[in-house]
């Protein structure tokens, strides 16, 4: 893969039609999924009155991705990208339509959500592979930055539209709106992506091949290190973010402050990925990977000092810029991925990310129960900083 020490431009990235199609389709799909999760949570709570079931409805699509990524990940390298990605969006549309039209028991709805989520790493891995096959050098890294920024914006848009839609037409009709948005992405992919042959011609059972491939990839020391470097800081940071509402309440901040605190890190992430992805030279970006992990974790330690609210928000925004550290790992990560299992590598990355982001809030939430939210958040920051030391040593 040719590498120059010049940052790519947005024009170079968007000049690739495959990236343009998947960029727009992904943004629409994430917005639709956020709307769907919100509407389903409201529907479950209004039906049952159970906070627990409502929370399960919110998170039912996360943990099953771990199973799907391990046992079905090889499909990303065995099937053509266009029908695989379009089929994934069509499955999402069918799920949203079923939730909106069928009057099914809550547990059945949650089972449907979990079943569809098993295939999510396959579809996302296929899309990531399609982009990696078309964008090279720093254009690929900038494409990843754009994808991350659009994902954050799409989630916020989906939640905002979901709140308006549920208030205006009700949860069930909002789910039908999400289904229509997913159908739009099917059309985008069907007519916007070229037909391509399967990346590989492997035969045999997909489940056995997926498991064998996952074991092979995770026993590769270099690839395992790069996966952990992307999984762990994100999991620790999400664990800290999950405690911001309780932190605000514990500090006696005004009601509604939790939303401001939770929005601070995404704002910082947008700024960080824009600046680091667009303006820094590739060599400098890679050297800054470990320092940016420190930026992600170190400001959280200062929350132990009980700073005033404006300073807390500023610290969280500054910490959010550290999420750009992952851009400095992308070139090496792509080079470490075996060509014949590149799609499965991306599926595995997504699988571990989602699984550990589910574990992080549980781990640090339990610590907060035993101590205080500030202590647990600071512990998450310290753990993040230790990952930076590991990354720096590995580079040396």
Image (cartoon, helix red, strand yellow):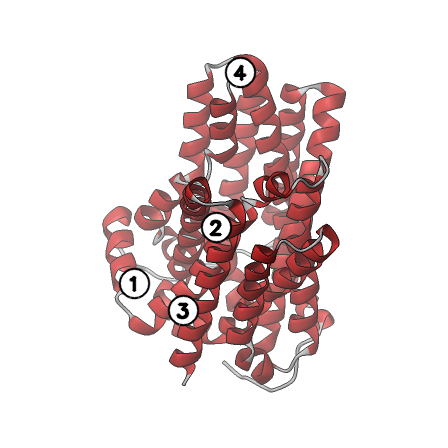
Where disc 4 sits, the SS reads loop
Q: Are marks 4 and 2 in contact (CB under 8 Å)?
A: no
Tell me which label, 2 or 1, sits earlier in the chain. Answer: 1
- Which labelled disc corresponds to residue 218? 1
- 111 on left or right of 7: left
Residue designated by label 3: 226
| Earlier sequence position, callout 4 versus callout 2 | 4
Q: Do we see residue 190 in this rendering?
A: yes
Q: Where is residue 372 drawn, in percent x and y? A: 50, 45
Q: Answer above or below: position of 298 versus 106.
A: below
Distance, label 1 to label 4, CA atoms, is 41 Å
Spatial CA span between label 4 and label 3: 43 Å
Disc 2: which residue: 376
| Of marks 3 and 2, the one in the foreground | 2
Residue at the location (50% across, 29% down)? 55
Mark 4 and mark 2: Cα distance apart in space: 42 Å
């Amino acid at each position: 893969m040719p590498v120059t020490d010049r940052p790519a431009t947005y024009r170079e990235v968007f000049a690739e039609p495959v990236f343009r199609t998947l960029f727009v389709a992904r943004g629409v799909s994430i917005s639709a999924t956020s709307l769907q999760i919100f509407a389903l949570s409201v529907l479950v709570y209004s039906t049952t009155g159970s906070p627990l079931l409502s929370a399960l409805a919110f998170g039912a699509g996360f943990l099953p991705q771990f199973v799907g990524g391990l046992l079905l990940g090889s499909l990303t390298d065995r099937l053509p990208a266009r029908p695989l990605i379009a089929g994934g969006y069509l499955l999402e549309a069918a799920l949203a339509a079923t939730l909106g039209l069928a009057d099914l028991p809550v547990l059945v709805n949650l089972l449907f959500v979990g079943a569809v989520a098993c295939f999510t790493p396959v579809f996302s891995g296929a899309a990531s592979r399609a982009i990696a096959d078309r964008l090279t050098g720093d254009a690929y890294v900038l494409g990843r930055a754009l994808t991350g920024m659009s994902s954050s914006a799409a989630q916020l848009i989906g939640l905002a539209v979901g709140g308006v839609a549920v208030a205006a037409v009700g949860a069930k009709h909002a789910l039908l709106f999400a289904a229509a948005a997913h159908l739009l992405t099917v059309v985008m992919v069907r007519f916007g992506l070229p037909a391509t042959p399967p990346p590989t011609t492997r035969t045999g059972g997909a489940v056995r091949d997926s498991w064998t491939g996952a074991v092979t990839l995770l026993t590769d020391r270099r690839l395992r290190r790069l996966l952990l470097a992307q999984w762990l800081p994100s999991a620790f940071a999400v664990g800290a973010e999950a405690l911001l509402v309780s932190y605000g309440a514990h500090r006696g901040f005004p009601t509604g402050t939790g939303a401001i605190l939770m929005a601070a890190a995404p704002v910082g992430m947008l700024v960080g990925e824009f600046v680091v992805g667009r303006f820094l030279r590739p060599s400098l970006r890679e050297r800054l990977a470990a320092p940016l992990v420190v930026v992600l974790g170190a400001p959280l330690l200062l929350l132990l000092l009980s700073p005033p609210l404006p300073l807390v928000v500023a610290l969280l925004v500054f910490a959010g810029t550290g999420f750009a550290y992952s851009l400095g790992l992308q070139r090496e990560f792509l080079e470490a991925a075996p060509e014949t299992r590149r799609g499965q590598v991306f599926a595995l990355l997504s699988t571990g990310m989602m699984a550990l982001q589910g574990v992080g809030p549980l781990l640090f939430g339990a610590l907060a129960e035993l101590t205080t939210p500030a202590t647990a958040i600071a512990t998450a920051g310290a753990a993040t900083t230790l990952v930076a030391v590991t990354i720096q040593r590995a580079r040396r």
